[in-house]
């Protein structure tokens, strides 16, 4: 079955700097790659997603890139702010309504 | 914005007892799911439910687990005889072209 690896497990960046989280997946049949933000005491919240027919997608300060050949995908957050501090999960799925396989998560700390 | 609602937020139960975790999915969603997250570990898929039946389940979802949509609005997860290792955060989700997760139920088995 699908396996998603995520790095780093913890990331600290100065406010205003960029943060990058990287993931790999194993199943070439995966076509949908969502990213979730989880704040303390809450469920995962979708922040951005990308389909396999797209190499890059951007939404304001957040961007995702996908290299389907290498089975790599990444999350980029620019101009980080204190409210970006959270746990971020990458994930892979066949399609939007299918089961999701999550990475282990990255705890992002934004330093003042 | 529509929400997935889970109750209770925290449940403590004795080992061997049955628990029912409750969820109210978003009303026009057709796909429903349960996931769990053991403390410090990744979120794991348990089961998906579509058209009033299980569409897929993981190897975690053994005979002690069951799901039900009893009245067209609620979606429940029952654990028949809880074990210590069932202690986790359980998330319900619903989807119609994209997931919405609830805030979770923290289950503590003592």
Image (spheres, rainbow, N blue to C red):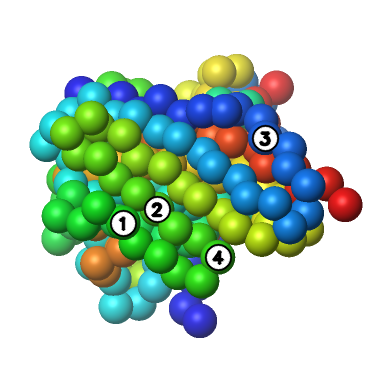
Reading the image, the residue beneath label 1 is A56
Q: Earlier in the sequence, mark 3 or mark 2?
A: 3
Pointer 4: residues within 10 angstroms few (<14), some, or many (20+)?
A: few
Residue B103, x across and y down, in percent: 58, 56
In front here: B109 or A68? A68
Residue B2, x across and y down, in percent: 47, 78
Reading the image, the residue beneath label 3 is A11
Residue A11 in sight here: yes
The answer to whether marks 1 and 2 mark residues whose Cβ atoms lie closer than 8 Å is yes
Q: Earlier in the sequence, mark 1 or mark 3?
A: 3
Report the Cα–Cα distance between label 3 and label 2. Answer: 17 Å
Q: Decide: is B43 above or below B8.
A: above
Left or right, A54 with reference to B78: left
Q: Decide: is B92 above or below B43.
A: below
Please give the name of the residue rendered at 35% of the width and 77% of the height, measured from the top-left corner: B27
Q: Secondary structure at mark 1?
A: strand
User: Which chain hosts label 1?
Assistant: A
The answer to whether marks 2 and 4 mark residues whose Cβ atoms lie closer than 8 Å is no
Report the Cα–Cα distance between label 3 and label 4. Answer: 17 Å
Reading the image, the residue beneath label 2 is A64
The circle on residue B9 is: none
Report the Cα–Cα distance between label 1 and label 3. Answer: 22 Å
């Amino acid at each position: 079955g699908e396996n998603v690896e995520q790095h780093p497990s913890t990331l600290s960046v100065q406010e205003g700097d960029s943060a990058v989280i990287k993931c790999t997946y194993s199943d070439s049949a995966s076509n949908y790659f969502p990213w979730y933000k989880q704040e303390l005491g809450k469920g995962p919240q979708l922040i951005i997603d990308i389909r396999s027919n797209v190499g890059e997608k951007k939404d304001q300060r957040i961007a995702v890139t996908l290299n389907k050949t290498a089975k790599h995908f990444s999350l980029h957050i620019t101009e980080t702010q204190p409210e970006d501090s959270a746990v971020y999960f990458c994930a892979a799925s066949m399609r939007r309504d299918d089961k999701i396989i999550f990475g282990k998560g990255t705890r992002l700390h934004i330093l003042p | 914005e529509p929400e997935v609602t889970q109750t209770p937020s925290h449940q403590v139960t004795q080992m061997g007892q049955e628990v029912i975790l409750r969820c109210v999915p978003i009303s026009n969603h057709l796909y429903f799911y349960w996931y769990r997250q053991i403390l410090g570990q990744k979120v794991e898929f348990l089961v998906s439910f579509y058209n009033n039946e299980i569409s897929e389940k993981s190897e975690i979802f053994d005979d002690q687990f069951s799901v039900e949509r009893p009245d067209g609005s609620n979606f429940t997860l029952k654990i028949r005889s809880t074990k210590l290792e069932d202690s986790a955060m359980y998330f319900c989700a619903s989807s119609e072209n994209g997931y919405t997760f609830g805030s979770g139920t923290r289950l503590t088995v003592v």
